[in-house]
Amino acid sequence: MHRRPGLSARLKLTLSYAGFLAVAGALLLAVVWGFILRYVPDNSQGLLGISPNRYLLVHTFAPAAAVAMAFLLVFGLVGGWFLAGRMLAPLTQITAAARTVGNGSLSHRIRMEGRQDEFRELADAFDTMLGQLESHVAEQQRFAANASHELRTPLAISQTLLDVARKDPTRDREELLARLQSVNTRAIGLTEALLLLSRSDRGHFTRESVDLSLVAEEAAETLLPLAEQRRITLDVTGGPAPASGSAELLLRMAANLVQNAVVHNLPVGGTVTVHTEAYGDTSVLRVENTGPPVAPELLPTLTEPFQRGTDRARTDEHAGVGLGLAIVHSVVRAHGGTLDLAPRPTGGLLVTVRLPGAP
């Protein structure tokens, strides 16, 4: 952005210091001058015929006062320039760090030393912001690389199937169309999940009062056929849990949690329990499922995009795209809540979502 050149902050502070010192000196001289003239008569005879009248005092004191004012002005300019430079040195360091970061070096940190003051508080906040920005950029780069890889796979499969069909006209067309439809459905699901994840990350949605108990019941009702197909008992318990947010995103969050609990369960005869409740100003949604044991070191990776938890059982038809818990984490974060994952002692996973309650 183009701006007209102006005075530097150091020069402005210098002029301010010098001006303040000059005004203070002028006021002091004015006070002294006023007191002296108050007690000196207009015309009187002093010792040895010397007459300390006001005329003589004015001509004697005025040049000395002018010299003193000139000295104060010069001293204020020089001293103000030096003091302003010392005061603005931390700001210069922060500016240099900002230029370094602007050139692409997000790993740079100020790490300003010394006691706590406004400049060091600003530097610490700047370092914290750089750390978060570096982490976010690294996460986005990793996500973009994984997304491009995931999207390239179905496209490559489709291209291979089309090449095979072109070279072998006698191949079963119904089988080819079925495989193409399956690959295309997976690509569409992945694209929709990526768009939803991007939307929740931006946090651009209209907030309204949403009851998590109703959201949980709707998600369970939608996924009940899948649970019955796998002979898994799906229960919804608890009471009202009002939260403030997007009904669509919260429903997708609950559906992802329930589907994740059903798919990563025992082969046959498992259970999934969805529970909602409110604690003061916090609404809780808890999804618990049976299943194989989950390694504790695997938990931090489950909310990363395209991390499917390879040690957990799932069926091929519901393998997903690896964005289920990543979307849940993004939705919870966009709503100002927290997401906790804990392994059950007997196997399976316990997921707890805490959201700020609605008024």
Image (spheres, rainbow, N blue to C red):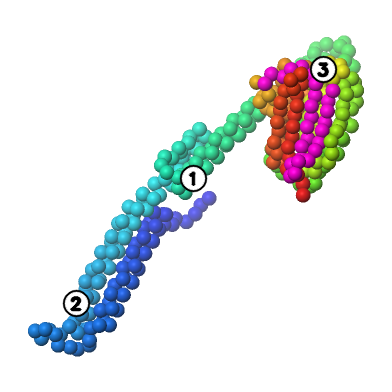
Horizontal side of 12 relative to 164 (left or right) equals left
Q: Earlier in the sequence, mark 3 or mark 1?
A: 1
Q: Are marks 2 and 1 in contact (CB under 8 Å)?
A: no
Q: Nearer the viewer, residue 111 or 97?
A: 111
Amino acid, disc 1 = Glu
Element carrying mark 3: loop
Q: Residue at x 31, y 60 (%)?
A: 76
> Which quadrant would residue 39 be assigned to in this image?
bottom left
The part of the chain drawn in magenta is: 271-296
> Which callout, 3 or 2, points at the residue further toward the start of the chain?
2
Answer with left or right where residue 86 lies relative to residue 192: left
Q: Which residue is mark 1?
A: 121
Indicate which disc residue 58 carries.
none
Determine if the magenta segment contains residue 279: yes
Q: Which residue is mark 3?
A: 266
- Image coordinates of residue 217 in percent, x first then y, are 87, 35
Left or right side of 266 for 83: left
Would you call the spot at circle 1 few (<14 residues within 10 Å), some (14-19), or many (20 or more)?
A: few
Image coords of residue 249 (percent x, y): 78, 38
Mark toward the viewer: 3 or 2: 3
